[in-house]
Every structure is written in structure tokens, then in C-alpha cells.
Image (cartoon, grey):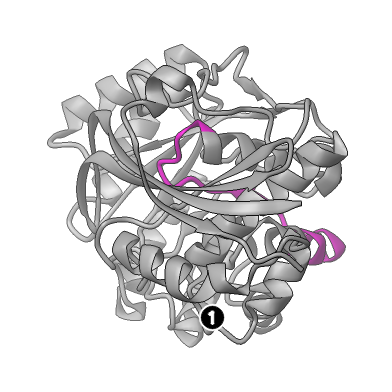
Amino acid sequence: MLRAIELWRGGIALVSPFRTSFGTDTSRDLLYVRAVGDEHSGWGECVAGTEPNYSSEYLENCVEVISRFLVPMLCADSTAQSFIADAAPIRGNYMSKATVEAALLDLQLRDQKISLAKFLGANKTKVPSGVSVGIQNNLNNLVRVVGEYLAQGYVRVKLKIEPGSDIELVRTVRKEFGDEILLQVDANAAYTVADAKHLKQLDAFNLLLIEQPLPEDDLAGHVELARQINTPVCLDESITSLDTARGALDLKACSVINIKPGRVGGYLEAKKIHDLCLSRGVPVWCGGMLETGIGRAANLALAALPGFTLPGDISASARYFARDITPPFVIESGHIEVPNTVGIGVEPLPEMLANFKRTAVFEVAKN
């Protein structure tokens, strides 16, 4: 039974700046939702940033939506499934919904004594780990950073790109490390369809994919781009639900999908998108949003599903944090082990949670 919802706030520094076409992050401002039950508690991590650049959602907006609109929907018998159904009239606000859903799901699975991986239908005990490399100040730094990650065992490299910092980056990495490494690029919607001829130069480098090259609402542009280039087009920001995923595939706007639970409203919707893609033979992979161990653990469970055939952005904790809020996830032989105890399989370390503040407690109405 659900007794209360708590909001926890804090921050954690990144081990190095992470630059994309949106800007540069040096730390994570964090929001966690804790669902408190009679015997157990469940945790959900909000993936929204401090500014509305990756998406229209941002952290303070999520606090407002969760506090004013989502929590009042809950009762003692609420489950992740009933919550998502009740929250359907709330337009958008996927990251807010996903945070509450994750906490409820963790709680109910702990009560049921099963893991999130088992609940979702995972068939793997470990998943291949890829790494996302932010835009570097110069090519020498890029080569050094990529080399260090490959030495750590990462099986796939993703390069962030933007206009003026793209073709030469890929050419340099291919020249330095060869054609055998799995390599892809992520534009974070930085280009327009008018750049198709320029982006076609990427065809020479045998990339796994180009991720979200155009603005999220330009499906027609992605259709046209996919016709003009041979590099597979993968959509990220454009995919916010099962319906948008189905539409993008029907239009042939992409041939690969990046599934981020926070972006699509939670793990239940992410599973539906996975199932759609699996039925159509469309490869998917799990993207990252600089999650700490709470979000990382849940993403590992999702990435262990059979349709996740491409390495995702689920890196070791040390990729981003000197010390994670949970016991750290480590990479071994290019893979990270999937938690398989109960719920998401991890909880915040008391000494790390002591650096956070419980900012709100909402008692849940009894039935």
C-alpha cells in the first residue's frame, strides 16, 4: 500500500564537462521521487535538465507538475499502471509522469519480490555498454578521450556533433582507431534538411547511425533526409510515445529508435515501443540522460529486453560521477550487469542521500 510521496533534491558534479549542441553541463541538478509504502520504498529519478533545451520540460516545471497535478491523483491502492491511466488527461509532461511511474513501479515490485528486469521481460543478465563523447575543444583532445574510453572497454562510441564540428571529427576518429570500432553520431536536432548534402559525407565512414539530425517536429524533413543518405537515421527527441514511434516508422522517417523512458513517459510506454519495434524488426537502443545510479539501474533492466540489439548509452557510473548516489555500476568486458534482486535493485547510499534534502512530503489519501 502506498502511504506517501516524497520529493528529494540535490546535486552532483560531473567528473568532466559534457558539451552538446545545447550547451555544456558540469553538474546534475537532481530530483528524486520516493514512493513510501507499508514495508518498502521505491525510487524514481527525474531526467529533466535545468533548462528547456533538450525538451520543453525542465526541472522546476517537473516539481510543479508532480506536486500540483500528479500526486493528487494517487491513493493507497495506486500502481504504476493505474497512475499512467489516471494521468492520461495531463498533456505531455512525460518526464514528470515517468518519475512518478518509476517510483511506484519500484515500490510495487519490491512488495511483489520481483525485479524490474523480470517484470519487463528481460532475457539478458548483462548489457553491452556504449559511451557518449561530448564535443571537445580540439581534435587532439577528442582522440585522447576516445582512446581512454576504448581502453576502459566500451564497445561503442557515440560522438556529439553540430554544424562546424562534424565531418572532421568522424574522419579523425576513424583514421585513428580504424573501421572495426562501432561508431555513431548524435546531432541533437542541430541541422536542417537543407544540410542533407553535407550530412551525406558521413556515408563514407560506415556509421551505425546518425541520431536526431533535424528538429524533433520535422518528420517530413527526416523522411527526405533518410532518402538522400545511406547512414541509418535514428530518432530520439521526436519519439515521445508509442503513437509517435509508430508514425515515424510508417512514414519511414527513421530505421532505428533510441528509447529513453523519461522522454516517453515511463518504462511501461518504453516497453510498448520496444515491442512495436521488435515486431517490425527495427533495432532499438537505450539512450542516456546523465542518470545517477537510480535511473541507470532501471535503464539496465529495460536494455536487457530482446529488441535492444544495439549498445546503448548506459555507461559505468565513473563515466560521469566521482561517486554515485548508489553503489557504482562498473563495466566488465564491455558489459554492465543487470540488477536482478527486487525492484530496480539499488537504493541510495545513506551517506550520499545525506547530501540531499527532502523538500516535500505528500500523504496519500486512504481509499
Name the secondary structure under disc 1: helix
Query: Residue 11, percent across and down?
Result: 28, 38
Quarter assignment of residue 85: bottom right
Image point (78%, 27%), residue name: 340
Horizontal relation, residue 124 to residue 158: left or right: right
Q: Amino acid at mark 1?
A: Val
Residue 65 vertical placement versus 152 (above, below): below
**Residue nearest the observer in this picture, 7 or 303:** 7
**Residue nearest the observer in this picture, 288 or 235:** 288
Quarter assignment of residue 84: bottom right
Residue 14 vertical placement versus 331 (above, below): below
Q: Quadrant of the C terminus?
A: bottom right
Q: Is residue 276 magenta?
A: yes
Query: Residue 74, percent across and down?
Result: 65, 68
Query: Residue 290, percent across and down?
Result: 40, 41
Magenta-highlighted residues? 273-293
Q: Is residue 236 visible?
A: no
* Residue assigned mark 1: 223
* Number of marks in picture: 1
Image point (52%, 45%), residue name: 206
Query: Residue 315, percent across and down?
Result: 50, 30
